[in-house]
């Protein structure tokens, strides 16, 4: 595929770049799902490639010829034509040509252009649900399922997926390659399963959505702590899932409740300058009451049946925070009880670290430090900056400012998010000032 020269940096070029970046994050995953449904999941790599190439062509041509009236339709038409050019060269194209042609015909209006609506909402929803379950097929290796879904459904690049899995980009790239190969070799169907198979795959689908939300709620890299677009996309996918009979399960409602209740607090997590605010410093009048109400509604729906999942318990913790009128009235005893039960289901050191924070709120900072020191497999947290941020906070509450400062320094070394670095730097300076005062 031929590339045009790099465009000259102009206001129009900058506008084009911003628009294509927005389309790539928000629309490309929908288009990949539609193309995959039309041309077959065995051509998943082709769908991803032509969408990416269409975006690249937009960035190369729009600065010269102007942004089209319907940018999404332009991207769709270009990607479709690129895919057809490749597929026509395949020996078995003639067998499938009538069906593909009929599907492609629906994309175009009478004048041969892609229609303004491009796709019906229910078609997009159905295609994305099919993609969710196809990515999480049992024949795809467990470690590759979520990575593939994050790539095809959420638009994550390999670096973002690597951060989510605490892995390397090279390892993630290999997982994705193996997953696509398995789809081709096993001829995995592009469908929404039923019965027990659907419930088995549902767990991987939920994990994918959960990881997507977490990356948005607390970004692993970049200048900003919060990426609201990822949080909104995760909530949209989870809502889509709960509205389908396969996903209308108590656990899925609990996951959606968890995300809604946490998303409700996003507006207050940073100040006007984008700096991180601790829970006790947040303006609770900025919490989104409508999202809290939706979250509580789905939490109530999750109570159907006898299942008690990790999502139920985490949603319960989020509900405790949202129900408190101020920081002082937070029911930390109830939060600790929920963490106790969560630790029984999930023995990960991250859960244990969060539980230690709750222990400190109920029994004091010394008890919190002892809880951190007793975490099994604590060595897994040695490269996790929040371990040292927590220890720094607990030591500062005990007025051990020198020890606290050393923990904050280590946390600073480990985090890559600019806003978190600024927050930790402020905490470090506070401790150093207190330590100097005590010394003199």
Image (cartoon, helix red, strand yellow):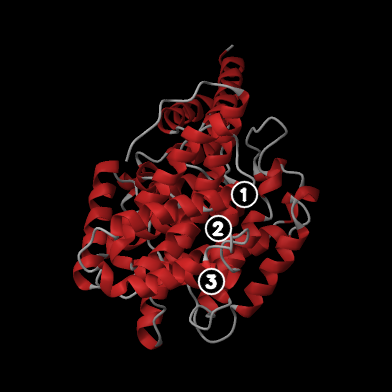
Report the front residue among 99 and 39.
99
Q: For mark 1, what is the residue? A: 70
Q: Nearer the viewer, mark 2 or mark 3?
A: 2
Q: Secondary structure at mark 3?
A: helix
Q: Position of residue 145 (x, y in %)?
A: 32, 63
Tell me the distance, in whole angstroms, between the alpha carbons under discs 2 and 1: 9 Å
CB contact under 8 Å: marks 2 and 1: yes
Report the front residue among 35 and 201.
35
Q: Position of residue 363 (x, y in %)?
A: 58, 53
The quarter of the picture where the N terminus appears is: top left
Is there any visible trace of residue 344 in the rendered image?
no
| Residue at left offset 64%, top offset 61% | 260
| Upstream in sequence: badge 2 or badge 1 | 1
Q: For mark 2, what is the residue? A: 114
Is there any visible trace of residue 284 in the rendered image?
yes
Q: Is residue 215 left or right of residue 382?
A: right
Residue 401, by quadrant, is top right
Tell me the distance, in whole angstroms, between the alpha carbons under discs 2 and 3: 16 Å
Badge 3, how many Cα within 10 Å: few under 14, some, many 20+?
Answer: some
Residue 123: give its label: 3
Residue 198: give its label: none
Q: Is residue 431 above or below residue 186?
A: above
Badge 1, how many Cα within 10 Å: few under 14, some, many 20+?
Answer: few
| Residue at left offset 53%, top offset 49% | 74
Q: How many marks?
A: 3
The quarter of the picture where the C terminus appears is: top right
| Residue at left offset 49%, top offset 29% | 408
Q: Is residue 239 above or below residue 171?
A: below
Q: Secondary structure at mark 2?
A: loop
Q: Position of residue 180 (x, y in %)?
A: 26, 60
């Amino acid at each position: 595929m031929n590339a045009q020269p790099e465009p000259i940096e102009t206001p129009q070029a900058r506008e084009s770049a911003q628009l294509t970046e927005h389309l790539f994050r928000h629309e490309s995953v929908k288009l990949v799902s539609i193309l995959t449904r039309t041309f077959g999941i065995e051509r998943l790599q082709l769908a991803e490639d032509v969408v990416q190439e269409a975006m690249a062509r937009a960035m190369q041509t729009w600065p010269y010829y102007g942004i089209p009236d319907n940018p999404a339709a332009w991207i769709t038409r270009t990607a479709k034509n690129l895919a057809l050019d490749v597929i026509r060269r395949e020996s078995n194209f003639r067998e499938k040509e009538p069906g593909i042609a009929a599907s492609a015909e629906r994309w175009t209006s009478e004048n041969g252009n892609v229609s303004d609506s491009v796709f019906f909402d229910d078609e997009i929803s159905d295609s994305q649900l099919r993609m969710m379950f196809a990515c999480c097929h049992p024949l795809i290796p467990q470690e590759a399922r979520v990575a593939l879904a994050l790539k095809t459904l959420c638009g994550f690049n390999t670096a973002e997926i690597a951060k989510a899995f605490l892995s390397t980009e090279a390892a993630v790239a290999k997982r994705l390659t193996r997953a696509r190969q398995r789809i081709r070799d096993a001829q995995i169907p592009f469908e929404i399963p039923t019965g027990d198979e659907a419930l088995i795959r549902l767990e991987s689908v939920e994990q994918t959505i959960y990881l997507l939300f977490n990356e948005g709620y607390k970004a692993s890299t970049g200048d900003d702590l919060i990426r609201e677009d990822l949080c909104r996309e995760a909530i949209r996918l989870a809502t889509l899932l709960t509205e389908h009979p396969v996903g209308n399960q108590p656990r899925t409602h609990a996951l959606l409740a968890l995300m809604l209740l946490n998303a409700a607090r996003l507006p207050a997590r940073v100040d006007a300058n984008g700096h991180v605010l601790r829970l006790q410093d947040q303006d609770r009048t900025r919490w989104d009451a409508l999202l809290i109400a939706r979250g509580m509604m789905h939490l109530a729906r999750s109570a159907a049946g006898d299942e008690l999942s990790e999502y139920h318990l985490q949603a319960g913790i989020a509900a405790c925070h949202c129900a408190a009128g101020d920081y002082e009235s937070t029911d930390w005893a109830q939060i600790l009880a929920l963490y106790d039960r969560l630790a029984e289901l999930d023995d990960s050191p991250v859960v244990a670290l969060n539980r230690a924070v709750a222990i400190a709120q109920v029994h004091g900072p010394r008890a919190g430090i002892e809880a951190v020191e007793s975490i099994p497999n604590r060595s897994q947290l040695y490269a996790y900056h929040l371990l040292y941020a927590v220890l720094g906070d607990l030591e500062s509450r005990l007025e051990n400012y020198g020890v606290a400062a050393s923990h904050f320094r280590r946390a600073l070394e480990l985090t890559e998010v600019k806003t978190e670095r600024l927050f930790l730097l402020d905490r470090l300076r506070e401790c150093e000032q207190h330590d100097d005062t005590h010394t003199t």
